[in-house]
Amino acid sequence: MTPAVWIEHYRLVASAAGVLFVAGLYCIVFSRNLLRVLIGTEMLTKSVTLLLVLAGAVTGRVALAEAFVITLIVLEVVAVAVAAGIVLGVYRQHGAARVRLLMELKG
Amino acid sequence: MTHLTEILVGLLTLAALWTVQTTILRAAIGLAATSMLVTLLMFQMGAPLAAVFELSVCAGLITVVFASTISMTRPLDDAARERCRVRRKRRFHPAFFAAALVGVALWATGYALEVTAPPPPAPPAVRDVLWGARRLDLVGQIIVLFVGVFAVVILFKPRGEEEEAR
């Protein structure tokens, strides 16, 4: 495979990670539903995962990148489970899962 | 390979944008599809173990967590659903332009990559890196898993029993 093909491949993957990052960020900033915010966070994490593997492939240290990705995925699943529990708690308390309801946690 | 990558990246973009602007349950399904496409890209880049983790945990387990959480909430009535749909469409339209802009920008700046050829595969295997150089990460993962289990048990404790205990 020619170097030009590899560079093209890396560029495509980098732009995909960028698109995922923007979509996730948009979801977080413009959503009022807590579950949707969580989905946006997940998309941001996927973008980071993709960039980690890309960095490993570019530098020739895929094994290290894989180790980081595995750690990231474990942390991600714990964070999602706990966050889903918090969302359900808010829903049970208020009957809705809106971001604005979390303002009542202040103080 | 480039054509396959182009197709995968195109599908990934569509899945991500669909996830952002659809209803919550469909968004959870879209997230699983996004995960699956990320998995395929990881396989292409020679990271099979991370890809398998991504597929089983992110596309499988996390989707189940989202679907379970959504099923425990009450669906909106028809009028509220229509109102939300219109508001969501209006709010997320700029996302398409922003995502396209960033994608094209990264595509263009990618020319600056000074990669002349795919580097040879690294000598140490993933298991050597995980159990050797990154052993402390594993300890951290185990601690975080225990903390997570503990937090979920506390969060899902039935409220009735708590009131009785008081």
Image (cartoon, coloured by chain):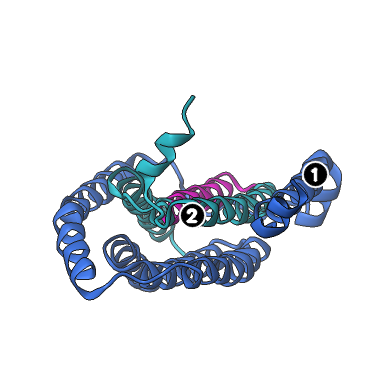
Camera-side mark, 1 or 2? 1
| Mark 1, secondary structure of its residue | helix
- The residue beneath circle 2 is A46
Amino acid at circle 2: Lys
Residue situated in front as seen by the camera: A54 or A76: A76
* Image colour assigned to chain B: blue
Number of other residues with Cα within 10 Å of mark 2, as a class: few under 14, some 14 to 19, many 20 or more: many
Name the subunit of mark 1. Answer: B
Q: Residue furthest top?
A: A107
Amino acid at circle 1: Ile
Residue situated in front as seen by the camera: A35 or B124: A35
Residue B23 on image: x %, y %: 31, 68
Check the image and report above or below for B39 versus A72: below
Residue B29 on image: x %, y %: 43, 73
Residue situated in front as seen by the camera: B112 or A46: A46
* Image colour assigned to chain A: cyan
Are the numbered discs 1 and 2 placed on the same chain, yes or no? Answer: no
- The residue beneath circle 1 is B143
Name the subunit of mark 2. Answer: A
Q: Residue at x 29, y 41 (%)?
A: B109
Q: Residue at x 22, y 66 (%)?
A: B80
| Relative to A46, A56 lies left or right | right
Q: CA distance from mark 1 to mark 2?
A: 23 Å
Residue range highlighted in magenta: A38-61
Check the image and report above or below for B35 versus A64: below
Main secondary structure along the magenta-highlighted residues:
helix
| Relative to A78, B96 lies left or right | left
